[in-house]
Amino acid sequence: MTNYYDELETQDPRTRQQSLIKAVAAQVAHAKAEAPAYGRILADIDPADITSTEAIARLPLTRKSALIELQESSRPFGGMAAVKSPQLAYVFASPGPIYEPGSKRQDFWRFARALFAAGFRTEELIHNCFSYHFVPAGAMLDSGAHALGCSVIPAGVGQTELQVQTIVDLRPDGYVGTPSFLKIILEKADETGADVSSLKKALVSGEALPPPLRDGFKKRGIQVLQCYATADLGVIAYETAAMEGLVIDEGVYVEIVRPGTGEPVADGEVGEVVVTSLNPDYPLIRFATGDLSAIMPGISPCGRTNRRIKGWMGRADQTAKVRGMFIHPEQVARVIKRHPEIHKARLVVEWINESDQITLQYEAETASPELDKAIAESIRDICKVRGETDRLPRDSLPNDGKVIDDIRKYD
């Protein structure tokens, strides 16, 4: 049995680098020709001039906020996608709102490699607890599982008792989803005395995996590895059994740049993750994720030769990822706008009892249970996650411009 998904994972790093530069140049030419927005953005770029990493670093950045603006004037994808019917299989709706395509291309989001690294193999049964509701998360894992030759239980989120019963009945080999929901399922199984011991491995994403949480899974006989992925780009990097950083996926070109600029930083220096996707159907060029990370020195002890990143190290902007969903400042502003009683507010993100918790701290003249309930409903409606409220007296919140205050600590 091979330890690697394919030969790309162990190729000579210099060969890979030259191949990636050529692939980026070809992707730029393709995007200019097939994606109208990139025809404008890259109008002055000659793909033939892209012969080095320095040339790639001179290409313009595309930010997530730009997708929202472009899509408002040109539905559904703002002219950024190169896939058209009948190859277009899905139109997803993520918070923002941002619409993302999914095509009929096998393993569109490249999850098979990450699943393989996490120990999943052909003919196994996977319990998929990523969301299938509007967002692409569930489909992202399904496509990779099918490419790997696995079957999938499309469990989604919620309905904890049914999740446990299904695992008891069908005995899946592993779990995919957020780590906090896996913890919830296991606690429900303990509460009911259910046997969920068939779960021996898991690939998790969407939120942090602190060491104490991973250790708790390990004590139950479940090896949990993680991957770093976004709805727009698919898998960017994935963890291996070595558990020393995340190996960059073979289907993307990754740079770490100084936040607020497009200038690459030295290896080891923390900066913003910028990704060029080599997927021809959705050719995002130098897409700035807003996430912070750093390149690690050397290659992984697992033998994979691609570069590694340290994993998610925070946000370069105020956007926060909560329970696998991005929350943007614009969404918080929409919540506030719905309720004229609010004078000022900010969304506080915390890590409590090994789970993400959000609270809208708001200033209002008087306390009102009805207003608290209405605000909580607005948070769920607009941000797609549950949140609490905390009324404060006038002039309690600092005048620092923060809309989202992420104070999570994973110690």
Image (cartoon, rainbow, N blue to C red):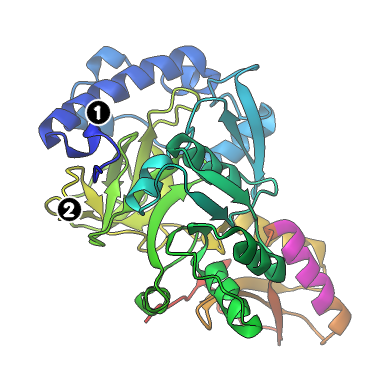
Q: Quadrant of residue 286?
A: top left
Q: Quadrant of the N terminus?
A: top left
Residues packed near mark 1 inside 10 Å, few (<14), some (14 to 19) or many (20 plus): many
How far across and how far down the image is residue 290, in percent? 43, 51
Bounds of the magenta segment: 372-382
Q: Quadrant of residue 395?
A: bottom right
Callout in the foreground (2, 1): 2
Element type at marker 2? loop
Q: Nearer the viewer, residue 338 or 103?
A: 103
Q: Residue at x 42, y 64 (%)?
A: 200
Q: Amino acid at mark 1?
A: Leu
Q: Which residue is mark 2?
A: 300
Q: Residue at x 53, y 58 (%)?
A: 177
Residues packed near mark 2 inside 10 Å, few (<14), some (14 to 19) or many (20 plus): many
Q: Nearer the viewer, residue 215 or 287?
A: 215
Q: Quadrant of residue 103?
A: top right
Residue 350, relative to residue 253: is it above or below?
Answer: below
Q: Nearer the viewer, residue 349 or 365?
A: 349
The secondary structure making up most of the magenta span is helix
- The disc at residue 20 is 1
Q: Residue at x 63, y 53 (%)?
A: 131
How far across and how far down the image is residue 31, in percent? 44, 19
How far across and how far down the image is residue 264, in percent? 24, 44
- The disc at residue 105 is none
Q: Amino acid at mark 2?
A: Ser
Q: Is residue 381 magenta?
A: yes
